[in-house]
Amino acid sequence: MAANDYKFKEVDKIIFGMISPQEVEKSSAVKVVTAELYDKEGYPVDGGLMDIRLGVIDPGLRCKTCGSKLKECIGHFGHIEVARPVVHVSYAGKVYEILKATCRECNRILVDEETASKYRTLHGRFKKERNFEYLRKLAKLAIGKAKLAKKCPHCNAKQITIKVEKPTTFMEGDKRISPIEVRARLAKIQEKDLELLGFDPVQARPEWMILTLLPIPPVTMRPSITLETGERSEDDLTHKLGDIVRINQRLFENINAGAPEIIVEDLWDLLQYHVTTYFDNTIAQVPPARHRSGQALKTLTERIKSKEGRFRHNLAGKRVNFAARTVISPDPKIEFNEVGIPQSVAMELTVPEKVTEWNKEWLLSLVKNGPKEYPGANYVIAPDGKKRKITKETQEQLLLEIKEGYIVERQLHDGDIALFNRQPSLHRMSIMCHKIKVLPGRSFRLNPSVCNPYNADFDGDEMNLHIPQTEEARAEAEILMQVQTQIMSPKNGYNVIGCVEDSVTGNYLLSKKLTISREDAVELLTSMGIFDAKFDKEMVKGSELFSRLFPEDFFFYGTAKQKDEAGVETFLTIKKGKIISGYIDDSSIGENNGELIREFYRKYGQDRTLVLLGNLFKLGIKVLAKYGFTTSIADTDIPEEAIEKIDELIANAYKDVDALVKEYEAGRLEELPGKTRRETLEVKSLEILNKIRNKVGNLAAQYADENTPTIIMARSGAKGNILNFTQMSACVGQQALGGQRIQRGYKNRTLSLFKQGDLGPIAHGFVRSSFKKGLTPVEFFFHAMTGRDALMDTALRTPKSGYLYRRLANALQDLKIEYDGTVRNARKGIVQFKYGDDGIDVSKSEGGKISVKKAIIDVVGQ
Amino acid sequence: MEEQLFKDYEGKLTKKIIEEVKAEVKEQGLTKDQTKKVLEYLKEEYDTAKISPGEAIGILTAESFGEPGTQMTLNVFHFAGVAEVSVTQGLPRLIEILDARKEISTPSMEIYLKKGVSKDMAEVKRVAALIKETKLNEIATEFSIDLTKLQVEVQLNQHRLKDLKLKPDQVAEALNANMKGVKASVNGEKIIIKTKAEENELMETYKIKEKSKEVFIKGVKGITQVLPVKNNEEYVIITAGSNLKDVIEIEEVDETRTTTNSLFEVLKVFGVEAARQNIIREAQRVIEDQGLDVDIRHIMFIADAMTTSGTIKGITRSGITGEKKSVLARASFETPLKHLINASIIGEEDDLNSVIENVMLNQPVPLGTGLPELVTRGKKETAKEGKK
């Protein structure tokens, strides 16, 4: 088909209904009469379940119905005529309802004419409005009313209570009503009554719920697989259908031979069982049909249901081509919106490129390289739609043939558009658009700063890459999904992308501590691509370099308290693009809380913010690379004096707890409101022991050398905090389980080495040692307890929150902003008149707010 | 004159912003010209910050809630202050709110008292005692059966009675009112409970004895714990158990500030708007207590989606999702077969107006860039008719 005669068709609506026996027969290609599948030569038997008129699953054969080959023929339905009617299990409940709601003599609905006509008016109205929800409610009402009638209001016949013996046997009083009779009754119900019973008589007659003809699905949906031994293994459905056909034939024979009624009925029940399990093999009252190995068969219902079923697995989830997946690794040298891909991936994935006057030469050179040499091309599509692979044989011919209008599927090169994704895709930043950069190696490379939105790390994570194939898709990806468009989170309006780890440390050091030579300053700036830097002085203060990054009209007033080198409290202030006071740290350029990033974004937009971020990042790591940065265990050393003070602090805390315990034992401890004495003791001692860690921490921090890398990292916010330092150098602190000291274990004690009733700190999980010193066995055990608890918590939480998310997404996915600014659902019902009452997009504003103060500063000036 | 300037921007800017500008203008003494510039600047900023039509705001909200959900703790209980009153927190509580459960695991109220009494500890304690539900076994020291007369004798705890300002005959009265088929009378310090039935058996008497222990005597039904807590200058009574309807009828209670964490009680007493506000308040509290940060718009959005029908609908298969119009959308969530079978009987039609059905059919989704429907006129027979 030529490209310009595509006919665009769209499904407008889907009407649901039941299939009638007539339709089954009409759409049937084969009447199946034998359970035999193949003859001696292994050829499908005519009239068997694998009849080639039902479709082809073997290469080389042609379908007898449509004449197409494998993969072209989608298959054709067949049918079997069941010897006696059987109930369709899924409709058994409905059949039961209808039987109860209609008269056993005249088959009218058991509602008097007056009420019925009232219902009918309502029905007419709802039907016209196509309000199926109300129609269903109306039917429920009518059936509920009809069920209660003892006598038929139309013919006065007395009604006998009908019971259902699950799943498919109906009893009227003590007598069983055979499916034949059920069918006869259902067939006699008039259309006007059917409507009230919740049927659409055009789409669904009730007697169709009792099967007389059973459709046989095409073989293409139940293909057999050939094992290595050459033996054929049939699909579960074929097995089940085989059972049905076999029993059906036997039933036929017995009926024709005039066998006794008992035998016929037994066979009939057996047929019913097989048909039931064919539709649904998980019904509670019915033993599931099994393989010879004892494994339950997977029949029709199981194919549709649950996560692995047709709906969620195949219909709501699609598989795609032009995708790649491999391990990720970091590369701080590439841009935030780039992704490094191995050459092997670049050679496999392609982009269709139309041959024009202007790119013909270039594309021909790619075709010349072919699929095995990079950069090359893999396929050529002629204007008539024929796709040909480029091989040694076809290459020459293609080179001659290609002219304008052809499409060349060329291999990826730098700058191509790709979508990059990491599961679980919890928010929209989990799929972003990056530009390709072909790199050596076998892994995907990404800048460590974009780990946060993906929630990725490099301990073996894998990620997926998709290449959009149409111009529209590429445009959309580039405009709406590129990394810079996603800097601000729609969750709370904070930046999800910022500087991390080394880059924060580097910027911190440069802006706070370093004074560098002119040559170094020029070199640092050059690493960011700034080549025209000039400095008059011999030595340059690090903070002066930043004026080259910020525009001259950039003003910024930080709100996070800082302490400068002299220990004076300041704030980061930038005026006219120059740092006046303070320094750069995590609170200004970090993830989630980077004030400076947010302010810059507000003023200069996404593209310039990305450039700034990239430059800051490069500058940061360059500083560390140039001046060196490492950390050692000696960083956590604190002076003897501090250790003594800490010992004293802890000893005092122990004394306090002991005093509490004594008070408790003497019965003098005053109860807190709503607590017992024992609980009061726990609360109070936990409070003391928790406080001690803070006190120790403050002390340790006081004595810590501010110039050690560990402390620098903690102060700059790059990694770790003072608590980590305290735990390494001084004291790990109290271990709490469920908001309490550790109480579990033996009777009246946590471990058998303690005395019974020991209420002291050590017996209840206080870890006095530091990580550097090492934990005692008891401390180690308590510490492991809380560690295990945290692990369990995460493991149990993930599926729960996953389900909550699925439910939320399913419930809310149709809600959108309409052109009039209202929020509406799929049926156009208004949910909000103005989104969030002010119509502000969280990701387009600062934390959902518009700051008047900042506007005044911008307009009026400083 | 200045007023006119602000008036011009009404509708173009939110009220809050205009108010803020007014305050700032006063404080900083801006000229009229400057004010106009500021307003114009703000308008531009506001316009760019506005949400775009077609934005899949539902999914955005679901993501904003789902992602922090993975960071919440599963630890169910937390003690509110130093109270014995424990409240479900974290993810379990969030699930409870979004499911719109009728029976919540830890109902609790915050009862504010009227200004006159709220600062007086003794008064507050008195009201608290008034609110707390008292059952017979809480004021009795002993239950015994008199075998000869076949009756239950209850020995009352005089101290407790005094605390609660109860008299034995009041207890008997309460028993008569709240227990069926028995007659209670006072005999000195004892209460005698007899069955009204003609025939009397030991078994029956034993049953009455056990039943009588749980009989409600005094207070507000359902409030099992009360705890006055100091909040700023005044005392607030925090309770375990909730009964909004009865509590706000107590005279000293300030019904304008008293709250409960039970969504359906608020719905019943104050209606759906209050219930919506309550969902917002409760959800926000959970998120803030966990130290997470989710914009209030998302919380409001969920509350609105749950309450648009006029009552509270949970985010469950029987709630919002179950009421979707599209058969396929419902079927793709949970219990697909049920939906397909029912649809086939009634001849239901699916208009393919929402997202998931179109995904299933490989068609553009009516959201975001799939929303605009520009039709170019092609050849006559290929021209596509735009969907209504």
Image (cartoon, rainbow, N blue to C red):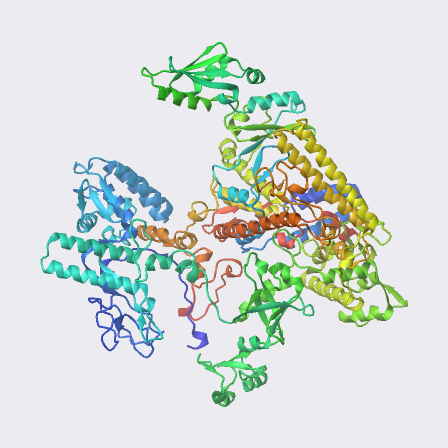
Q: Position of residue A741 (x, y in %)?
A: 63, 41
> Which residue appears at 17% of the width and 51% of the height?
A180
Q: Is residue B256 visible?
A: yes
Q: Give the left or right position of residue A803, taking residue A529 as reference.
A: left
The vertical placement of A110 against B37, above or below, is above
> Which residue appears at 26% of the width and 51% of the height?
A201
Q: Position of residue A798 (x, y in %)?
A: 53, 52
Q: How many marks?
A: 0
Q: Position of residue A259 (x, y in %)?
A: 10, 57
Q: Is residue B3 visible?
A: no
> Which residue appears at 17% of the width and 36% of the height?
A158
Frontmost residue, A482 versus B90: B90
Q: Give the left or right position of residue A556, taking residue A155 as reference.
A: right
Frontmost residue, A523 versus B194: B194
The quarter holding residue A237 reads bottom left
Frontmost residue, A38 versus A424: A38
